[in-house]
Image (cartoon, rainbow, N blue to C red):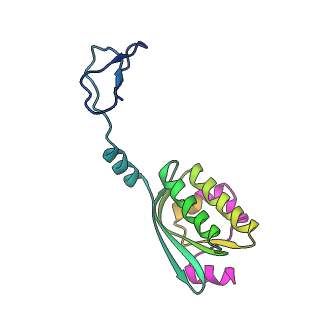
Amino acid sequence: MTFATDTARLIPNPEVSGSGRALTRPSTRPKMAAVSPASVAAWAFVMSVRINVRKRDGVTALDLEGRIILGPAADSVARAIQERIAQGTRKIVLNMGGVQQVDTAGIGTVVRCFVSMQRTGGGMVLVSVPDRVRLVFEMSRLFDAIPSAPTEEEGLLTLR
């Protein structure tokens, strides 16, 4: 639907084609372009994190690249980890070497996934955490609770 922002009264917009009837508010301002699903998908792709899942020595490793922030990125990470837990995975190495930024939503996602692993009797370790991201975790004192290691090899040893 397309909307202008002047008044609360809604009127049909005859300029909108398609099967649905869009409503618009009368306005003297120029109409804003409607947001297409393709542009929303492109925005979500830009804003999301890339996740590569692999097995190494019987441990599931998730390589993360991008920004773990509120929205599709944090949701993608949570979904990837929760799917592995549901499949019976009990050891996860979260390789954060490619992560540029983590916000409070990203921190919450990591904490919830760590707690889920603990409840199933499994373990999760963060590895290759960049300095900028490490600072966020240290300031929130999460490295006192969530195991971390400088390299993936050391992280694998932590989970044995």
Closest to the observer, 127 or 4: 4
Q: Would you say 141 lies left or right of 51 here?
A: right
Q: Quadrant of the N terminus?
A: top left
Question: Can you say whether 113 is above or below 128 in the image?
Answer: above
Q: Count the numbered circles shown.
A: 0
What x and y, as percent, mark residue 97?
Answer: 49, 70
What x and y, as percent, mark residue 45?
Answer: 38, 54
Q: Which segment did they paint magenta?
A: 136-160
Question: Can you say whether 39 is above or below 9 in the image?
Answer: below
Q: What is the magenta segment's predominant secondary structure?
A: helix
- Name the residue rendered at 58%, 65% in the picture: 83
- Name the residue rendered at 49%, 55% in the picture: 73
Quarter occupied by residue 11: top left
- Residue 145 colored magenta? yes
Question: Can you say whether 9 is above or below 129 in the image?
Answer: above
- Name the residue rendered at 51%, 51% in the picture: 69
- Name the residue rendered at 27%, 28% in the picture: 16
Closest to the observer, 95 or 27: 27
Quarter occupied by residue 151: bottom right
Closest to the observer, 93 or 23: 23
Q: Would you say 100 lies left or right of 85 here?
A: left
What x and y, as percent, mark residue 64?
Answer: 49, 66
What x and y, as percent, mark residue 26?
Answer: 32, 14
Q: Quadrant of the C terminus?
A: bottom right
Identity of the residue furthest to the front in this view: 19
- Residue 151 colored magenta? yes
Identity of the residue furthest to the bottom in this view: 57
Q: Would you say 147 lies left or right of 103 here?
A: right
Question: Can you say whether 73 is above or below 32 in the image?
Answer: below
